[in-house]
Image (cartoon, helix red, strand yellow):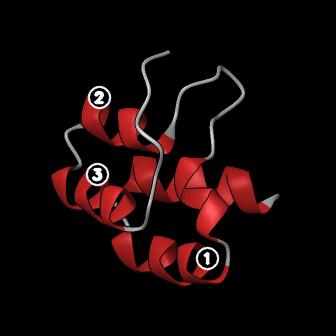
Amino acid sequence: MSEQKTFFEAIRSAILRQLKCPCRSDASLASAKNEAGVSGVLTAVYLGRVEIRDFLIASGALLELP
């Protein structure tokens, strides 16, 4: 599984600890978009994952509307 797919699976599963290490080693991952063009931050918002949303924003995720 690609790093990006693992990233979005961790968001869907609400596993914050799985996001921390990859985002620290690759800051661009915080701004990654899934195959539908939806960002990790927006995915976290849709799923009600407040801690993950806040972590991604603090990690430098770019905030933009689709």
The answer to whether residue 31 is above or below residue 3 is above
Q: Residue furthest right?
A: 2
The part of the image, by quadrant, that contains residue 52 is: bottom left
Give the CA distance from mark 2 to mark 3.
10 Å
Which mark, by number, is residue 53?
3
Q: Residue flagged by tag 2: what amino acid is it?
A: Tyr
What residue lies at 40% left-to-right and 80% top-to-bottom? 17
N-terminal of the pair, mark 1 or mark 3, is: 1
Does residue 5 lie above or below 29 as drawn? above
Read off the residue under disc 1.
Answer: 22
Distance Cα–Cα, label 2 vs label 1: 22 Å
Mark 1, Cα crowd under 10 Å, few <14 / some 14-19 / many 20+, is: some
Helix, strand or loop at label 3? It is helix
Residue type indicated by callout 3: Arg
**Relative side of 40 to 6, left or right:** left
The mark nearer the N terminus, 2 or 3, is 2
> At 53% across and 57% down in the image, what residue appears?
30
Q: Is 8 on the left-hand or right-hand side of 13?
A: right
Residue type highlighted by circle 1: Pro
Where residue 11 appears, as percent x and y from the top left, is 43, 52
Bin the neighbour count of mark 2 within 10 Å (Cα to Cα): few under 14, some 14-19, many 20 and up. few
Outermost top residue: 66
Image quarter hosting the N terminus: bottom right
Q: Which residue does the numbered mark 2 point to in the structure image? A: 46
Tell me what residue is drawn at x 49 percent, y 75 percent: 18
Spot occupied by residue 56 in the image (x, y as percentages of width and height): 38, 59
Relative to 62, say whether 23 is above or below. Answer: below
